Image: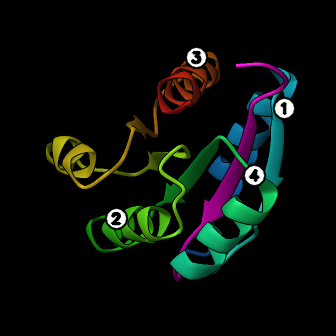
Amino acid sequence: MSGAIRVLIAKVGLDGHDRGAKVVARALRDAGMEVIYTGLHRTPEEVVAAAVQEDVDVVGVSLLSGAHLTLIPRLAELLRRSDARDIALVVGGVIPDEDVPVLRDLGAADVVLQDTPPDEVVRRVRAAARRAA
């Protein structure tokens, strides 16, 4: 990849807590990535439209609400429909361990759990971007 990795950080649905998303956004920025944060309460359609418009390499979705098995398949489908298969979908937040392989099967390039250190998040986002390119 040439140039800085572009990442869109999104909070989808009714989840109103974004501290973790902001911590991740800061870690990615500090690592030299360009980060766009969409804010709270976005729809999957808004997130995908922003990702395509901003020409990002990675969409990072932070979920705490328990709606990950509903929202991630919708996001993956919308990315496919938007011909944005080159955008990696990385999921983070409070995700039960048993849902991690399910989310990967549903289209997530990676699933980063809440206790993952920031430097590891950076490494995994870089890896997801490289695989998707």
Q: For mark 3, what is the residue?
A: 123
Query: In the rendered structure, which amino acid carries the disc numbered 1?
Result: Arg
Position in image of residue 71 (x %, y %): 38, 72
* Disc 1 versus disc 4: nearer the observer: 4
Three-letter code, disc 4: Asp
Q: In 3D space, how far apart are the residues under numbered discs 1 and 3 (Cα atoms)?
A: 13 Å
Query: Mark 2 highlights which residue?
Result: 68
Q: Mark 2 and mark 3: span between their CA atoms?
A: 23 Å
Where is residue 125 shown, x and y percent of the image? 57, 29
Q: Amino acid at mark 3?
A: Arg
Residue 111, above or below 53: above
Is residue 2 visible in this depiction of the protein?
yes
> Disc 2, disc 3: CB below 8 Å?
no
Mark 3–mark 4 distance (CA, rounded to whole Å): 21 Å
Colouring style: rainbow
Relative to 107, 22 lies left or right? right
Residue 65 makes an appearance in the image = no
Which residue is tagged 1?
29
Mark 4 nearby-residue class (10 Å; few <14, some 14–19, many ≥20): some
Mark 2, secondary structure of its residue: helix
Q: Are marks 3 and 4 in contact (CB under 8 Å)?
A: no
Q: Alpha carbon of mark 1 to alpha carbon of mark 2: how far? A: 25 Å
Q: Quadrant of residue 30?
A: top right
